[in-house]
Image (spheres, coloured by chain):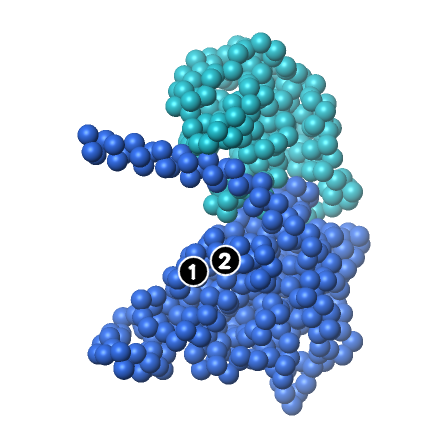
Chain colours: A cyan, B blue
């Protein structure tokens, strides 16, 4: 941990990459209402990302604004967790990712709302309400899919198993941070266990625990995501949009 | 409706912009406050009741008797409008992932989301006429109902997002504002809500082009190129010229349509000329000039043969747009089935509890 800049960057990058992935669902969701709901969640994540990256830029004091941070860094400079950069895959995988992300972001933003840094506290207090909605939405779908048809049960269990290893990275201890992620694990476990149980799903086994996102060591997927996200901005250096 | 470029003998209506939406909304409230005449005394009075309500500029409501042809015309028109909103998400959705700033990304994502909302209100309005959304979606996916042909053109650059907002949403508003006074209540009410949002979209598109046109030389060229490609297809949104448009008289009498295709097209051209000047962009029409006698601009007609080809399915993106929608629908089937199964289980549990 290198101080508040790094902390704001991590949270901002999580939100930005999550938004980029969720927005990929636009025009592709399983039903029209879900197209709207996923766009809503993507917009919330994007809104939080903009606040966090703007603040990160100010903390850094090198004149970088939200767009400089979003568009002009390479993948090795991104600090998001691996979970958010994983491809959307099918709807079950997307919902597993969203369940785990929101069950982490809700206690994180709630704790942040109480922290000493006023700017971070204001962001946390706004974002936690949004996270509560994201968690509700993901929980409802995980239950529907887990306790729906045979096929949806099979897909939802496979999705939870597939994504679960990426959860460990979220709670890597960081005692100096405004909120130490390790302190959020108990609440996360309680939330997720309750949802999985109601969804008639088995809680995946912990074992392999990939990490590296916080140090800029990502999966192969992030570089492609950024190539697409940044292509136009980078093609016109210095232009205003 | 989005446009009148659907292919089926379509009609249009015309009007002004946000001020007129508000005027229509006031008229709607005023008409609702006025007591409608008593319901028909007998079956012999049904047609008379319908005619009097339309004549008095009041609203036909879902439970009222209406001529079968009126019902059919409305279902087709509202459904095609709904399909246009849903298919119309694709060309702009194409740029969400690459939007050049986070602010633009947020605005575009919210816009495309609005269009999904418009689709939903309109399907709901059509459902009041006794047809289900699922049936209408099937008609679209089977190719038996159309959507606005404008969405069969590709979005090749970021400036196309601006051009769609300014021109396509602009043309849609010109078409839709008169529909806020349509004789069918649920459609008129949906149109008021939609028109207000479309006017934001138009402003946002205009703003994108304005920023580009006042940016780097490459950005300005990108904006001009987008205007060059979108101008004539936007004019074609108003449908074939009046001489070739059928069904109009009946729709006019029913107060579903209030202005002809050519009247609306003229109104749109007149509106755009001044805006293009402020943008500093050139409308790609050497024949464009003010006609003092007509108090309107003379302009070159769009290529209606091209419009017919696109309507028939041979536009640049017809196949992709339909394939994309069919794929999303098919890929989502297992999710919709799961939701239905889950709801069924919960309902059964509730019943059991009540019985116990
Ligand atoms: Fe719309
Ligand atoms: Fe629109």
Q: Position of residue A151 (x, y in %)?
A: 51, 30
Q: Which residue is mark 2?
A: B136
Q: Position of residue B33 (x, y in %)?
A: 27, 70
Q: Which one is nearer the viewer's eye here, B126 or A109?
A: B126
Residue at image point 31% right, 66% down: B63
Is residue A187 visible in this depiction of the protein?
no
Question: Does residue B227 sit above or below A17 in this rendering?
Answer: below
Chain letter, disc 1 residue: B
Label 1: element kind: loop
- Closer to the chain start, of discs 2 and 1, is 1
Q: Which one is nearer the viewer's eye here, B249 or B34?
A: B249
Disc on res. B131 = 1
Image quadrant holding the N terminus of chain A, namely top right
Residue at image point 43% right, 60% down: B131
Question: Does residue B315 sit above or below B99 in this rendering?
Answer: below
Tags 2 and 1 touching, CB below 8 Å:
yes
Residue at image point 48% right, 40% down: B336
Please state if B10 lies on the left or on the right of A135 as rendered.
right
Q: Residues within 10 Å of mark 2 (few under 14, many from 20)?
A: many
Q: Is mark 1 within 8 Å of ligand 1?
A: no
Disc on res. A73 = none
Query: What is the residue that sits farthest to the bottom in this orientation?
Result: B293
- Tell me whether marks 2 and 1 sit on the same chain: yes
Q: Position of residue B89 (x, y in %)?
A: 59, 52
Is residue B244 visible in this depiction of the protein?
yes
Label 2: element kind: helix
């Amino acid at each position: 941990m290198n101080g508040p800049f790094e902390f704001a960057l991590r949270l901002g990058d999580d939100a930005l990459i999550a938004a980029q992935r969720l927005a990929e669902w636009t025009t592709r969701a399983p039903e029209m209402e879900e197209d709207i709901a996923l766009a809503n969640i993507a917009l919330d994540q994007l809104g939080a990302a903009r606040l966090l990256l703007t603040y990160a830029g100010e903390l850094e004091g090198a004149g970088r604004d939200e767009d400089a941070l979003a568009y002009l860094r390479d993948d090795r400079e991104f600090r998001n967790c691996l979970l958010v950069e994983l491809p959307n895959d099918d709807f079950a995988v997307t919902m597993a990712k969203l369940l785990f992300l929101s069950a982490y972001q809700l206690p994180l933003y709630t704790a942040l709302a109480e922290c000493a840094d006023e700017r971070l506290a204001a962001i946390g207090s706004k974002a936690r309400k949004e996270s509560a909605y994201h968690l509700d939405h993901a929980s409802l779908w995980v239950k529907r899919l887990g306790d729906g048809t045979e096929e949806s049960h099979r897909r939802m269990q496979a999705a939870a198993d597939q994504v679960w290893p990426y959860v460990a990275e979220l709670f890597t201890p960081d005692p100096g941070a405004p909120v130490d992620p390790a302190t959020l694990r108990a609440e996360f476990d309680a939330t997720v266990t309750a949802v999985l149980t109601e969804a008639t799903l088995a809680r995946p086994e912990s074992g392999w625990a990939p990490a590296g996102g916080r140090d800029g060591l990502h999966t192969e997927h992030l570089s492609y995501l950024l190539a697409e996200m940044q292509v136009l901005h980078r093609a016109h250096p210095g232009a205003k949009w | 409706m989005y446009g009148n470029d659907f292919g089926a003998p379509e009609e249009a209506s015309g009007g002004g912009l946000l001020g007129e939406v508000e005027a229509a909304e006031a008229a709607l409230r005023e008409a609702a406050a006025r007591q409608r005449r008593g319901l028909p005394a007998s079956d012999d009075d049904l047609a008379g009741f319908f005619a009097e309500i339309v004549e008095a500029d009041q609203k036909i409501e879902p439970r009222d008797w209406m001529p079968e042809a009126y019902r059919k015309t409305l279902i087709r028109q509202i459904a095609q409008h709904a399909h246009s909103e849903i298919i119309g998400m694709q060309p702009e959705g194409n740029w969400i992932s690459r939007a050049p700033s986070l602010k633009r990304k947020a605005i575009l994502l919210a816009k495309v989301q609005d269009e999904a909302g418009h689709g939903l209100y309109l399907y709901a309005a059509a459902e009041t006429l006794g047809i289900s959304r699922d049936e209408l979606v099937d008609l679209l996916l089977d190719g038996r109902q159309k959507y606005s042909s404008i969405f069969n053109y590709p979005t090749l650059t970021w400036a196309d997002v601006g051009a769609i907002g300014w021109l396509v949403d602009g043309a849609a508003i010109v078409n839709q504002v008169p529909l806020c006074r349509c004789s069918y209540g649920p459609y008129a009410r949906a149109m008021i809500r939609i028109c207000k949002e479309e006017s934001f979209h138009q402003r946002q598109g205009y703003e994108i082009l304005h920023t580009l046109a006042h940016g780097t030389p490459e950005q300005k060229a990108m904006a001009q190129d987008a205007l060059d490609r979108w101008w004539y297809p936007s004019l074609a949104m108003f449908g074939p010229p009046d001489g070739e448009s059928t069904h109009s008289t009946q729709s006019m009498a029913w107060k579903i349509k209030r202005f002809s295709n050519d009247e609306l097209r003229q109104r749109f051209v007149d509106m755009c000329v001044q805006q293009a000047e402020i943008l500093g962009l050139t409308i790609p029409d050497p024949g464009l000039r003010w006609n003092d006698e007509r108090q309107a601009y003379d302009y070159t007609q769009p290529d209606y043969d091209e419009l017919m080809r696109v309507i028939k399915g041979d536009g640049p993106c017809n196949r992709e747009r339909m394939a994309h929608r069919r794929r999303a629908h098919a890929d989502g089937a297992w999710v919709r089935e799961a939701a239905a199964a889950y709801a069924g289980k919960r309902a059964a549990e509730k019943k059991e509890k009540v019985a116990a």
